[in-house]
Structures are given as C-alpha cells and as structure tokens.
Image: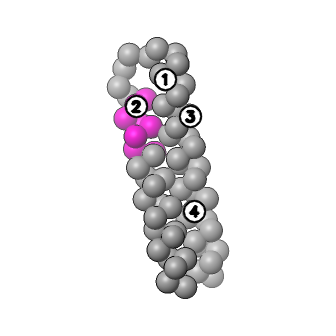
Amino acid sequence: MQARRTHTVRTFGTMALVTGFVISLLSMSAGYEGFMPHILAAFLILTGIGLRIEAAIADRQS
C-alpha cells in the first residue's frame, strides 16, 4: 500500500513540475506582461518539488 501511495505522489509531483515549466515557457514566449501565470508556474514547480521529495523520503523509509 505504501509503494502505491509513493508512486502516486511521485506522479503528481512530476505532473506539477512539467505543467509549471510549460506554463512558464508559454507565458515567456507569448510576451505576456502580467505576473499571474508566473506565480501559478512557481507555485506548481514548488509543489512538484515538494511532492517528489516527500515521495523519495517515503520510498527510502519503506
């Protein structure tokens, strides 16, 4: 059960990282001047990093 949870958390972390980087790249290439997409991208990237770290710690303990 723990391995399944770890895999799920790792997957969501990866999805958050990829989504954050895609949002960042798209808003930079489009020349968008507002801060909202960059704040969203930063939030997703930090969340993804946190989830990946949590999954690594949980995987190491099991």
User: What range of the chain is rendered magenta?
Assistant: 37-44
Residue 38 appears in which quarter of the rendering? Answer: top left
Residue 30 horizontal side relative to residue 1, left or right: left
Instruction: Please state the horizontal and vertical placement of residue 58, each as a whole percent of the image.
Output: 50, 76
Local crowd size for mark 3, using a 10 Å CA cut-off: few (<14), some (14–19), many (≥20): few
Q: Which residue is at a point 37% across and 20% down the rendered structure image?
A: 34
Amino acid marked by disc 4: Arg
Q: Identify the element where label 3 is drawn.
A: helix
Quadrant, the N terminus? bottom right
Q: CA distance from mark 4 to mark 1?
A: 26 Å
Q: Earlier in the sequence, mark 4 or mark 3?
A: 4
Amino acid marked by disc 3: Val
Q: Which residue lies under the disc numbered 3?
A: 22
Nearest the viewer among 14 and 8 is 14
Q: Which residue is at a point 44% across and 37% down the rendered structure image?
A: 41
Q: Which dot marks residue 38? A: 2
Amino acid marked by disc 1: Ser
28 over 22 or under it: above or below: above
Q: CA distance from mark 3 to mark 2?
A: 11 Å
Q: Which dot marks residue 27? A: 1
Specify whether residue 39 is painted magenta: yes
Q: Which residue lies under the disc numbered 4?
A: 10
Amino acid marked by disc 2: His
Q: CA distance from mark 1 to mark 2?
A: 8 Å
Instruction: Please state the horizontal and vertical placement of residue 9, each as a whole percent of the image.
Output: 55, 64
Q: Which residue is at a point 48% across and 31% down the rendered structure image?
A: 24
Tell me whether circle 1 and circle 2 mark residues in contact (CB < 8 Å): yes
Quadrant, the C terminus? bottom right
Q: CA distance from mark 4 to mark 3?
A: 18 Å
